[in-house]
Amino acid sequence: MSGNIGICMDREGKKNNQKAPALFMIAAGLILIASAITYAMLENMNRFSEPGKILVSLGLAGSGILVILLGLNTKFPWKGSSGFFLACGSLLSISGVLGFIILYPEDWFYPKVAYVVLTYTAGILLLLFNIMLQQSGNTSMPAESGSEPQDIETGNTMYAGESQLVAVISSMMVSRILYPEDSYASWNSTDNENEIYIINNDIIQDDKEKGKICETGSSSGNIPETMFPETMMDIDPETSGTIETNGTTDTFEIITETGTKSATAVTKSKSFFSMKRTDIRKDDHMKEAAHKILRFHFGRMLKHERGTMLGKDIEELHDMRVAAMRMRSVLQVFNGHLDMNTMKPIFRNIKDTRRSLGAVRDLDVFMEKIQHYTGSLPEDRTSELDELVGTLLIERDKARGLMLLHLDSTKYDKFKLNFTKILEKEGQWEESLVDRDGRPLPHRVRDVLPPLLYNELSKVRAYDDLVREDEPSFEMLHALRIDIKILRYTLEFFDEVLGEETKSLIKDLKELQDVLGDIHDAVVAMELLENYLKYGKWDYTEGRKSVGEQIIIDPGVENYLAYRRKEITELLESFPEVWTKVMETDFGVRFSNVIAELYHN
């Protein structure tokens, strides 16, 4: 009897010795995961957060999951296949965590990211498999004595209960990380953006819209539509979509051949998804005109969204970006006629979308320029930019990945839903006809548009003395390009109520804007190529310390850099000719004629 008691006590001691480190490791893992979640909440983490913050939170979470599984594995004896699975699983999981820490974010691109994810996943699966294997082995062992089963069964029952509790808690924590609540998905990275909104005084604009040589697009934040086979997605061909509305319900459905996507909204009118024109009238209120323009271009943006995500035609992304840019310009053209408390978050989301699209589009344009250049080279030199092209493909995949994350985010879905509600709410677009003192306010298109157009034209023509200097600054030319774009968009917004010569005016402005755009692109390309040769990386290097000497010797890139410098010189020489078209008397006469059409029946 005493021998049996000694055996039982010895076994109970061994179980306790195995139990203690297991509980310690499980507790440590839960603490790591809780720390990751707490840190994410305190830092307002989202997919566009700084790389350092993402590294800390995901590193803690991944390590916590690994430590919990190791703790659960320690309750079993390390022998035979159990030891093999435990060793391999631990090695692979640890390698995955270390690989993420080492590679993120500078080298975090395909295929390296795939190797890290697969390594970590394989390790976690091996540890889970080992737990299930050993657990099934324990439960299938038959009892061999009459006195021991009660003690052993009691111990196993208690430990199994604790294991189930830990497993439930672990599952909840992991689910919290992998599938966060809507409150997590609704976090956004635009709260700290430096935007200036001046209401009823000056146009509202980004602080970076003027005064800089180039726009860098989204830096983190700021997402693959692709012209390159290496990154092309093999998805069903694009399907056209329509929005069906029902006045008796509070939902709208976007119907495609691949299924139905529903979202809550208040819809009382036919869809703007298939609008062919804005149908602006001369007697419309300005706010009503803004409503029609936003409906039209929002429909255009949604129309090209699927094609942009498929990535088989780069023009889909271009058209979607143009629609977003035109909606953004409504903010400047209709300043003073919009309710900014309602529209400010909408325009901020439009800007975020435009930037995510622009980051990819800029690289597409750069690649097109390179293809044009290499196509003019002798056959023995056509491959001299292959290394640069490879770098650009990687950068484009990064940008496209961020773009897809943005377009697939809860934040973007909420923006579309909220904007749809606003556009379909008729009372939202009723304009006040008098001021606080009861005096009438100018509000009709035929009365407000003429001074608006003349004011935008005067802004453009004011550059004349500056652009005629021997060496006009690139910053000034970039600011001129933005003002020309606003004037051109204003004419396009109202071309249905202006004279027949509107299209010729738009053509002249577009020709001038294209030349300035080419100058801007060449300046940006020159800066990027110089930084690439100096620092060995393809990005903007504002604030980076110079290494003092060129670290990349690439004759092909140096030749292309010289080609882009020459291009700038040629563009600057051609600029006066297109500029003169806007400054000559004939342009002003035609401009006045199209405005006079507003007063004809």
Image (cartoon, rainbow, N blue to C red):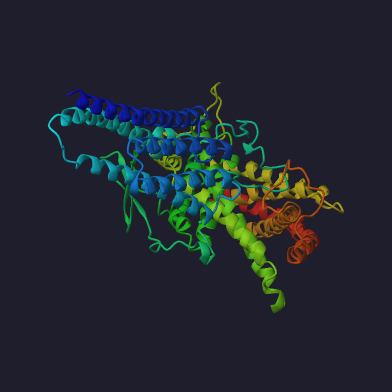
Find residue 224 and report its horizontal and vertical position in percent.
51, 56
- Label total for image: 0
199 and 304: which one is in front?
304
The residue at 41%/37% (across/down) is: 65
Q: Which residue is farthest left?
A: 146
Find residue 482 and report its horizontal and vertical position in percent.
67, 47
Q: Which residue is farthest top?
A: 437
Q: Is residue 182 above or below residue 385?
A: above
83 and 321: which one is in front?
83
Find residue 465 and report its horizontal and vertical position in percent.
83, 48
Q: Which residue is farthest right?
A: 470
Residue 475 as seen in the image, left or right of residue 173: right
Give the quadrant of residue 435: top right
456 and 241: which one is in front?
241
Res 418 visible: no
Q: Is residue 473 above or below residue 168?
A: below
Give the quadrant of residue 11: top left
Q: Is residue 577 above or below residue 120?
A: below
Res 131 visible: yes
The residue at 41%/50% (across/down) is: 122
Find residue 232 and report its horizontal and vertical position in percent.
48, 63
Residue 335 as seen in the image, left or right of residue 79: right
The residue at 39%/64% (across/down) is: 237
Quarter of the rendering occupied by the N terminus: top left
